[in-house]
Image: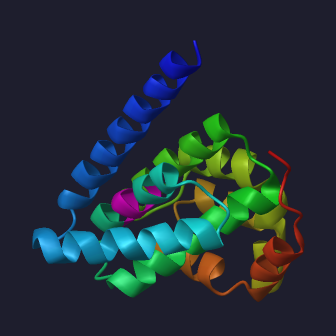
């Protein structure tokens, strides 16, 4: 029984790595870039107390979505870190995090955070969003109004996320859950 469980775990790990590499192939140029990007994202996932799969998923969605905005790899990696930390600070479960990551990627691609995208982000990042809004001098209610009016651009939301030192501090203070 133990060998069967171990075999399944190895197969699942191999499938996860294959998925990770396939996602990264879509946003990298060649094997060297793929290996370097995977290495950086592996380091980011450890630093953000996340697993590699969701980190790569967020990064690739943001990389594709922000291409027209001209975001550099470094900026996309920074956004990946901040979003991962925000989800951790808020205590979002895997399903909620996955939904927020998908909606955040869609918002970035459309250029505006509104409607279902905003609601999903608020649901997943509630406490972290409050921290970020306060630091930017606005309330979550004002963010919602901006969203409803189509005034909460992807660029503005990215800046709010990126420019939140208190979010990083809250992440550092957060205890790592026991396995």
67 or 73: which is nearer to us? 73
Question: Where, quadrant-wise, is the C terminus in this rendering?
Answer: top right
Q: Which residue is depicted at the point 10% across and 71% down?
A: 30
The part of the image, by quadrant, that contains residue 120 is top right
Which residue lies at the image location 85% right of the left edge and 49% below the top edge?
Answer: 178
Q: Kindly tell me whether residue 140 is visible in this rendering.
A: no
Q: Quadrant of the N terminus?
A: top right
Q: Within the magenta stretch, is there residue 79? A: no
Question: How many marks can you see?
Answer: 0
Way the structure is coloured: rainbow
Residue 154 spot, x, y in % from top left: 47, 69
The percent position of residue 155, horizontal first and vertical second, equals: 47, 77
Q: Does the stretch in magenta take in 59?
A: yes
Residue 169 screen position, x and y as percent: 83, 82
Give the image quarter of residue 105: bottom left
Using the image, determine if residue 77 lies above or below residue 110.
below
Residue that extends furthest to the left in the rendered view of this protein: 30
Residue under the image location 56 percent in, 40 percent down: 99
Secondary structure that dominates the magenta span: helix
Q: Residue at x 82, y 77 (%)?
A: 172
Q: Is residue 56 above or below residue 34?
A: above
Q: Is residue 147 left or right of residue 75?
A: right
Q: Residue furthest top?
A: 1
Measured from the top left, where is residue 111 in percent x and y? 39, 65
Q: Nearer the viewer, residue 18 or 145?
A: 18
| 76 or 65, nearer to the observer | 76
Q: Which residues are magenta?
A: 58-62
Is residue 4 visible in the rendered image? The answer is yes
């Amino acid at each position: 029984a133990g060998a069967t469980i171990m075999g399944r775990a190895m197969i699942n790990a191999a499938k996860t790595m294959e998925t990770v590499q396939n996602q990264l192939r879509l946003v990298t140029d060649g094997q060297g870039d793929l290996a370097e990007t995977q290495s950086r994202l592996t380091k980011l996932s450890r630093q953000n107390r996340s697993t590699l799969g969701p980190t790569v998923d967020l990064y690739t969605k943001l990389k594709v979505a922000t291409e027209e905005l001209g975001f550099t790899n470094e900026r996309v990696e920074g956004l990946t870190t901040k979003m991962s930390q925000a989800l951790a600070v808020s205590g979002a479960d895997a399903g909620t995090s996955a939904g927020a990551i998908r909606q955040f990627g869609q918002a970035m691609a459309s250029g505006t955070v509104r409607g279902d995208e905003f609601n999903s982000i608020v649901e997943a990042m509630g406490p972290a969003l409050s921290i970020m809004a306060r630091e930017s001098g606005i309330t979550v209610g004002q963010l919602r109004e901006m969203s409803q009016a189509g005034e909460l651009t992807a660029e503005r939301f990215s800046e709010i996320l990126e420019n939140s030192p208190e979010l990083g501090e809250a992440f550092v203070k957060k205890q790592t859950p026991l396995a």
